[in-house]
Image (cartoon, rainbow, N blue to C red):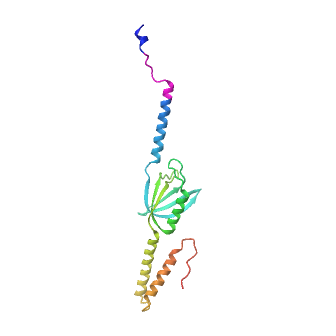
Amino acid sequence: MTEAAIEPTKSGPSAMQRVRRFIYGMLLFALLVVLGIRYAPTSSYEGQVQRVYEKALEYRVEFVTSDGEVRVFNNLEQRFPYLKFDTADLQANLEKFQREGDTIRITVWGIRSAMLSMFPNVVGVERLQPGSNLREARNARVTDAVLSELRAMQLVPVGREVELEQRLRRAVDVATESLPGEPSPQRLR
């Protein structure tokens, strides 16, 4: 026997092995892309919801950040890659936060592209400060300012200051309860 016959021939992987390796490589690449997109960084903003509306069958949110910047976000179901299924609940909460003037932290995923008319998508909302406290503080300031002016003009009857302050607080509270588009508040007697 010759030496060549005894040594096994060294050939590369078979065509089937190369195809299998290619498929495994593509599956691993696809998994990494999906995980990379799913866990891509999100952005969070603090502020108040200015307006919530529907446009072209998409929920939209106009949001004013703490530093006064206005941003627009989508609120859409997102099955891939973020697996978000609570759009209707999130929309109802956003409308409630808008009505009450709550300060919230809104978390979004995605980018804003004016050229493609793309908006980041809302993926989470957290209430930071109830708006009713803000409204009460604002109403107290308005009441105090009006009382100060009435005192300066000497229009506050002696002995009726407490009663006048209570009536003013009630009137300011009623006046600020109504939302745009609702009928005017009833007049106090």
Task: Judge left or right: residue 85 versus residue 126.
Answer: right
Residue at position x 47%, y 46% in the image: 37
Image location (x, y in percent) of residue 109: 47, 52
Q: Which residues are magenta?
A: 8-19
Does the magenta-highlighted stretch encompass residue 17? yes
Image location (x, y in percent) of residue 92: 54, 62
Residue at position x 43%, y 57% in the image: 44
Residue at position x 45%, y 20% in the image: 11
Quadrant including the N terminus: top left
Residue nearest the viewer, comparing 35 with 109: 35
Residue nearest the viewer, comparing 134 with 149: 134
Quadrant including the C terminus: bottom right
Does the magenta-highlighted stretch encompass residue 18? yes
Which residue occupies the extreme top position in the image?
Answer: 1
The answer to which quarter of the image holds residue 88 is bottom right
Image location (x, y in percent) of residue 182: 57, 72
Count numbered badges in the picture.
0
Which residue occupies the extreme bottom position in the image?
Answer: 158
Image location (x, y in percent) of residue 42: 44, 52
* Position above or below: 125 against 13: below
Residue nearest the viewer, comparing 3 with 26: 3
Residue at position x 47%, y 30% in the image: 21
* Position above or below: 144 against 5: below
